[in-house]
Image (cartoon, grey):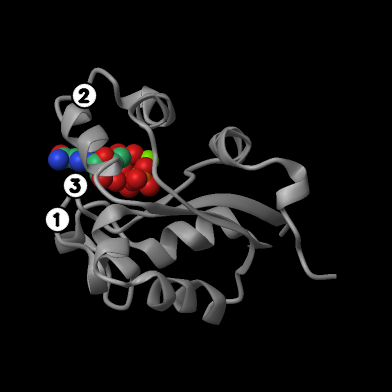
Amino acid sequence: MAVERTLSIIKPDATRRNLTGKINAVYEDAGLQIVGQRRIRLTRPQAEAFYAEHKDRPFFGELVEFMISEPVVVQVLQGENAIARHRELMGATNPEKADEGTVRKQFALSMGENSVHGSDSPESARREIGFFFSELEILPCA
Ligand code: RTP
Ligand code: MG
């Protein structure tokens, strides 16, 4: 198994409820290293571009409004098999279907306000990390 990097976002419903530290603890306790992290407010064009793959879906407008409603925390996670590991730790998109102990089971409010994002493939991880971070801002420990 290879060391991978993935793009994680702590979404507005979670920053609003002061859950950044609790969510980071789930990732760190599972052995993922937070090698880049920044709290930002997404602009509307940024949110639309980030979620461009969903632009024709009925929930797109609601998703963009939600993602710009409060600050988010964007982060790069690194570790063995990080992309799939992170998706497991997040749980299913719909929190009602998420496994016990996952971030979404513990914290998500609904299908839309589901607390976290994670890249779903090596290709999307590359694109999404590059969307927010330069190489100089990604600092793994040796
Ligand atoms: P994400 O991209 O945020 O990590 O979530 P995901 O892969 O589990 O889900 P995806 O299908 O990519 O959907 C992206 C985000 O859109 C919102 N959504 N709302 N109301 C709805 O039916 C609905 N479906 C999706 C969620 O915030 C989801 O995470
Ligand atoms: Mg997705």
In the structure shown, which secondary structural element does the residue marked by tag 3 occupy?
loop
> In the image, which disc is placed on residue 110?
1
Q: Earlier in the sequence, mark 1 or mark 2?
A: 2
> In the image, which disc is placed on residue 112?
3
Q: Quadrant of the N terminus?
A: bottom right
Neighbor class of circle 3 (other Cα within 10 Å; few <14, some 14-19, many 20+) is some
Neighbor class of circle 1 (other Cα within 10 Å; few <14, some 14-19, many 20+) is some
Residue denoted by label 2: 57
Looking at the rendered structure, the kind of residue marked 2 is: Arg
- Is the residue at mark 2 in contact range of ligand 1, meaning its CB lies under 8 Å from it? yes
Looking at the rendered structure, the kind of residue marked 3 is: Gly
What residue lies at 27% left-to-right and 76% top-to-bottom? 100
What residue lies at 49% left-to-right and 45% top-to-bottom? 119
1 sits left or right of 122 in the view: right
- Is the residue at mark 1 in contact range of ligand 1, meaning its CB lies under 8 Å from it? yes
Q: Nearer the viewer, residue 120 or 27?
A: 27
Pointer 3 and pointer 1: residues touching (CB < 8 Å)? yes
In the structure shown, which secondary structural element does the residue marked by tag 1 occupy?
loop
Q: Residue furthest right?
A: 142
Q: Quadrant of the C terminus?
A: bottom right
Quadrant hosting ligand 1? top left
What residue lies at 39% left-to-right and 39% top-to-bottom? 42
- Is the residue at mark 3 in contact range of ligand 1, meaning its CB lies under 8 Å from it? yes
